Image (spheres, grey):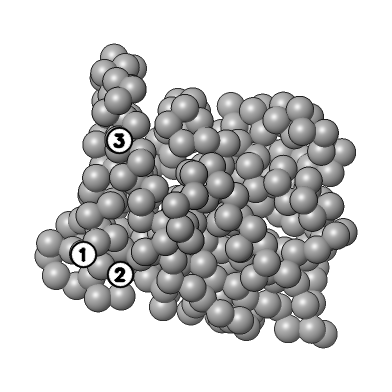
């Protein structure tokens, strides 16, 4: 695991309060990578990642989901609409909570979704009440990942599943240049650390879960950052960010760093599916 000690939790909340509008304008309603099979639009690719992950987690009608790091509610709303499940979304950002609730009402799934502003590392649920713990590109922001996985595993009913998509430090990112690339991404995107695929599987197994499978989707998601970087250049949004907040400028400038880290193998993008053994 590669760490960036300078990142503070208050900065993570500030980033999402401030940058949610940038995410929405530059990318779309889902604050996560797209998953490409061919030449689909970015919007289609974002939905494909959600659907692929939901298929692997076997999400079906009536499932009760907790969406950790729900952002603007994209996954929760989509799953409630298309799979008739119920979802509780957790975000550290008050702005994102309001945005997600409004969007859910607009899409007529307000009765099947609930959004809570809370720190995921402090959030509590009753044991064995959840069918699926879902998290897309949030665990990178957690400070004690091992403790989170232990707690989240307790939420799951026997037979429940955990579905995680995460940015990863590459398994072979052991050269100074590669480590610097990962550190620069952590700094620019406000991640206190990035674990490897081995780390994630270890945390899940230590929590009593069985790993069903993990998928390396790096090559299928990497073009996300080509598109975002191109949109930054064309929109002039970096000029606006310079007026508002210098950390947001660094965030925009590190899009290229993340793309290069995928190319060098310093980083990977992984999807993990694990299951709680039946009683």
The crowding category of the residue bearing disc 1, from other C-alpha atoms within 10 Å (few below 14, some 14 to 19, many at least 20), is some
Residue at the spot 24% in from the left edge and 36% down from the top edge: 253
Name the residue beneath numbered marker 1: 264
Label 2 with label 1: CB-CB less than 8 Å: yes
Where does the C terminus fall, quadrant-wise? bottom right
Q: Is residue 70 toward the left or the right of residue 18 in the image?
A: right
Q: Disc 3 vs disc 1: which is toward the camera?
A: 3
Name the residue beneath numbered marker 3: 230
Numbered marks: total: 3
Residue at the spot 59% in from the left edge and 32% down from the top edge: 96
Choose the circle earlier in sequence order: 3 or 1: 3
Q: Which percent across, then down, holds residue 237?
A: 33, 22
Residue 170's mark? 2
* Helix, strand or loop at mark 1: helix
Residue at the spot 51% in from the left edge and 67% down from the top edge: 271
Q: Is residue 5 toward the left or the right of residue 203 in the image?
A: left
Q: Is residue 121 toward the left or the right of residue 141 in the image?
A: right
Q: Which percent across, then down, holds residue 211?
A: 58, 81
Is residue 137 visible to us here? no
Q: Which residue lies furthest to the top in this view?
A: 243
The crowding category of the residue bearing disc 2, from other C-alpha atoms within 10 Å (few below 14, some 14 to 19, many at least 20), is many
Label 2 to label 1: alpha-carbon separation: 9 Å
């Amino acid at each position: 695991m590669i760490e960036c000690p300078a990142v503070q939790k208050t900065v993570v909340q500030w980033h999402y309060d401030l940058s949610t509008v940038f995410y929405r304008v530059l990318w779309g309603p889902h604050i996560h990578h797209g998953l490409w099979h061919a030449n689909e639009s970015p919007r289609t690719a974002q939905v494909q990642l959600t659907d692929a992950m939901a298929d692997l987690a076997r999400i079906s009608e009536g499932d009760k989901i907790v969406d950790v790091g729900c952002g603007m509610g994209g996954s929760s709303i989509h799953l409630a609409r298309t799979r008739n499940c119920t979802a509780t979304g957790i975000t550290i950002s008050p702005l994102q909570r309001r945005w997600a609730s409004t969007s859910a009402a607009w899409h007529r799934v307000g009765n099947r979704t609930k959004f809570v502003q809370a720190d995921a590392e402090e959030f509590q649920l009753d044991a064995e009440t959840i069918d699926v713990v879902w998290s897309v590109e949030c665990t990178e922001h957690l400070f004690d990942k091992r403790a989170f996985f232990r707690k989240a595993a307790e939420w799951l009913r026997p037979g429940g599943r955990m579905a995680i998509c995460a940015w990863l430090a590459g398994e072979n990112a052991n050269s100074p240049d590669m480590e610097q690339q990962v550190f620069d991404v952590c700094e620019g995107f406000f991640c206190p650390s990035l674990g490897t695929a081995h780390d994630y599987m270890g945390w899940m197994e230590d929590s009593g879960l069985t790993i069903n499978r993990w998928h390396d989707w790096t090559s299928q998601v990497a073009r996300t950052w080509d598109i975002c970087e191109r949109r930054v250049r064309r929109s002039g949004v970096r000029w606006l960010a310079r007026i508002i907040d210098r950390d947001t400028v660094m965030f925009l400038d590190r899009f290229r760093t993340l793309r290069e880290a995928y190319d060098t193998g310093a980083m990977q993008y992984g999807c993990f599916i694990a299951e709680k053994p039946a009683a």
